[in-house]
């Protein structure tokens, strides 16, 4: 009887984990309900970043842990893969600029931004990042004084 209890408990614990191969079957464009059905449940962590819902799934192989993310835009999977985070030493302005590459209108009003060419948008983005890096360098030199 004790062995049966241990086996049933082990089975229940194993069935509660989300297998990584299910994650591999998630496709860009799937909606949240399809993902939950495929994965057998919701994520271990949810957050909101850059107007997107971010779901994290944690997988364990022995003592090895891996984390995978799904990003949702308009309730559909728009990104699947490794966690996305800030780069070491990157300022908030640079992160904002990098995250806004889809609509880089820095230094232009919204009506002006609509008329910018992709090259002009890229130049504005690079200028914005350079100005931010210079500001960060100035702040560092003040700390040294």
Image (cartoon, helix red, strand yellow):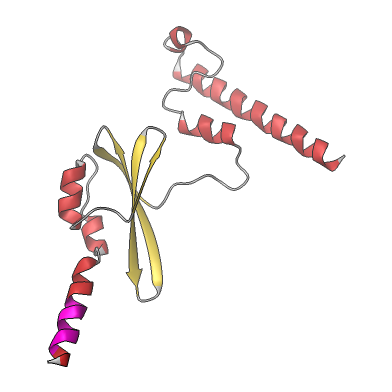
**What secondary structure do most residues of the magenta stretch adopt?**
helix
| Residue 84 x %, y % | 44, 47
| 103 displayed left or right of 86 | left
In the image, residue 41 above or below residue 31: below
Q: Which image quarter holds the C terminus? A: top right
Q: Is residue 89 left or right of residue 26?
A: right
Q: Which residue appears at 20% of the width and 49% of the height?
A: 35
Reply yes or no: does residue 9 show up in magenta: yes
Compared to residue 50, the image places residue 81 above or below, namely below
Q: Is residue 112 above or below residue 135?
A: above
Of the 4 image quadrants, the one containing the N terminus is bottom left
Comparing 6 with 36, the one in front is: 6
Report the side of 140 relative to 116 (left or right): right
In this view, the residue in front, 19 or 8, is 8
**Is 122 contained in the magenta span?**
no
The residue lying at 19 percent from left, 41 percent from top is 31
Rendered location of residue 63, percent (x, y): 40, 75
Q: Which residues are magenta?
A: 4-11
Residue at x-position 61% and y-position 23% = 127
**Residue 118 found in image quarter:** top left
Residue occupying the point 27% across, 63% down:
20
Nearer the observer, 132 or 42:
42
Q: Position of residue 76 (x, y in %)?
A: 24, 38
**Quick check: 27 left or right of 111?**
left
């Amino acid at each position: 009887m004790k062995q049966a209890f241990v086996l049933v408990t082990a089975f229940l614990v194993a069935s509660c984990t989300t297998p990584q191969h299910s994650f591999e079957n998630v496709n860009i464009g799937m909606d949240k309900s399809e993902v939950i059905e495929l994965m057998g449940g919701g994520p271990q962590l949810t957050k909101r970043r850059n107007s997107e819902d971010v779901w994290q799934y944690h997988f364990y192989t022995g003592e090895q842990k891996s984390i995978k993310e799904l990003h949702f835009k308009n309730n559909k999977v728009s990104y699947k893969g490794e966690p996305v985070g800030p780069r070491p030493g990157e300022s908030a302005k640079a992160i904002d600029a990098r995250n806004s590459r889809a609509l880089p209108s820095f230094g232009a009003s919204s009506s002006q931004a609509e008329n910018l060419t992709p090259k002009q948008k890229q130049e504005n983005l690079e200028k914005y990042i350079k100005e931010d890096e210079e500001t960060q360098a100035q702040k560092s030199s003040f700390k040294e004084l």
